[in-house]
Image (cartoon, rainbow, N blue to C red):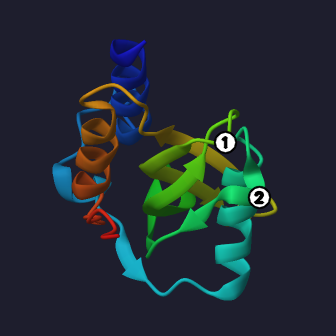
Amino acid sequence: MRKTVQLLLAASLCGCVAAAPQPDAGAQRANPMPISLALEEIVTTGIRQRLPNPASAKFGTMLAGERTLNGRQEIVVCGYVTRRNASGANGGDKPFLAKIYPDAGSSFELVAMGDDTPNGGLVVSSACRAAGLPIEPRTP
């Protein structure tokens, strides 16, 4: 499962086409932008819909940036969410990486969320760092 997530994450961030030359790392980086209340609402609602106990979600600081990949504008958002699992136990801080597409009615895509494996959050944190949005774990 972890390898599948890593491959999907790498493919979504690459923006490559088989016949096109590989873009330089700078093309993957997003230009930092402030998070409006409307953008925050899109992100929190989108993530809550994918949690077993949505009411328990508490969001830390989020970072956002704009970029254009393959001619499509996207807003990349990275952050942490603390949530409870289905049994009510604390699930801890989980990093997430999401995309919003302004040209598609601000559609939301959860690209990745850290899981409970030992390195589950490292893949997401690394992808955020590569996008120019380094996230730091929340402190209790």
From the image, which quarter does the N terminus lie in?
Answer: top left
80 and 102: which is toward the camera: 80
- Seen as rendered, the residue at the extreme right is 105
Give the CA separation, mark 1 to mark 2.
11 Å
Q: Secondary structure at mark 2?
A: helix
Identify the residue under disc 2.
Answer: 55
35 and 92: which is toward the camera: 92
Residue 14 in the image, given as x and y percentages of width and height: 33, 37
Picture layout, residue 132 above or below residue 84: below
Please report whichever mark, 1 or 2, sits nearer to the chain's N-terminal start: 2
Residue 132 in the image, given as x and y percentages of width and height: 26, 65
Residue 54 in the image, given as x and y percentages of width and height: 75, 52
Identify the residue under disc 1.
Answer: 88
| Amino acid type assigned to the residue bearing label 1 in the image | Gly
Q: Secondary structure at mark 1?
A: loop
| Corner quadrant of residue 128 | bottom left
133 and 26: which is toward the camera: 133
Q: Is residue 18 visible?
A: no
Picture layout, residue 70 above or below residue 26: above
Residue 42 in the image, given as x and y percentages of width and height: 73, 67
Picture layout, residue 90 above or below residue 66: above
Q: Residues within 10 Å of mark 1 (few under 14, many from 20)?
A: few
Residue under the point 37% across and 79% down: 32
Picture layout, residue 30 above or below residue 39: above
Q: Residues within 10 Å of mark 2 (few under 14, many from 20)?
A: few
Residue under the point 32% across and 40% down: 121
